[in-house]
Amino acid sequence: MNSYRKIALILILFPLFFLGQEKPAEKLNARFVIKTSAGIPKPITSNLFRKSFNGFYDLGISFNFRTVGNFYFGIGYQNVFFKNNAYLKQQVYNASIPYDTRLLADIPFVAISYDKYFKSDSYIKYSLNYGYILGKYTNVNPDTSEKNKPLISKGFSGQYIRPEVSFNFIDKDNTWVSFSVMVSYTTLLYKYDPRSPRFAHFYELQPISNRYAMSWLTVGFGINVLLGQSKE
């Protein structure tokens, strides 16, 4: 877990290196940016959540308006999908039946961001998203053993914080489009409860700590539409 945190910190802070490089002065980006992203989330904390689930996709879209300088305010929507790890199986007599429990979540959010050019057609975007996650476990195998009691809802909600850094490269033939590679670290102000997906009875999970809130690291790519570009 500590190694994942170090990787996340390095990837998020690495773009600061470019701030010391020589670059065009105060070039403004487009007035309005439609930002899309797609990546694979890797659970980081809690240990129990990381051992229970693995990420399949993390998709997002946001609509961003430039305010002062290259600062933006935006609103957006994110959808994430996790599936239980393969070693969690249901024992029926002498057979093992794979689980297919999934975590699906919708996340509306607001965002503030800042664009910093390091070349005439390339810029770094620093973003901070804040929103509310609406999560639900689906394909849950019913289990009424004592470890899963009292039975609780298969859905949950909570606040969400997501810092993100992306490198963006404007298409030279279509200057209203930019492509990006990104890394983000999502933290939920919610603590994972294995009773919700009915996982508390698994002996493999019982000794694992659950001290921290749920979080994941996402690495991916994106396409942005740049509208109302500055003529500077």
Image (cartoon, helix red, strand yellow):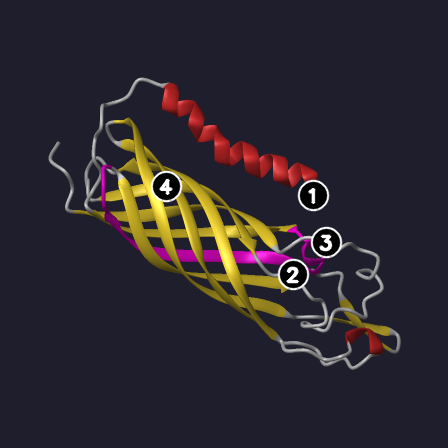
Other-residue count near label 4 (Cα within 10 Å), few / some / many at <14 / 14–19 / ≥20:
many
The mark found on residue 1 in the picture is: 1
Mark 3–mark 1 CB contact (< 8 Å): no
Q: How far apart are marks 3 and 4 (CA)?
A: 34 Å
Q: How far apart are marks 3 and 2 (CA)?
A: 8 Å
Q: Is residue 137 visible in the rendered structure shown here?
A: no
| Coordinates of residue 167 in the picture (x, y in percent) | 38, 36
Other-residue count near label 1 (Cα within 10 Å), few / some / many at <14 / 14–19 / ≥20:
few
| Coordinates of residue 53 in the picture (x, y in percent) | 66, 59
Q: Magenta span has 61?
A: yes
Q: How far apart are marks 2 and 4 (CA)?
A: 32 Å
Residue at numbered disc 4: 180
Is disc 4 placed on a helix, strand or loop?
strand
Residue type, label 2: Lys
Relative vertical location of residue 174 with respect to residue 21 in this rendering, above or below? below
* Range covered by the magenta-colored residues: 45-69
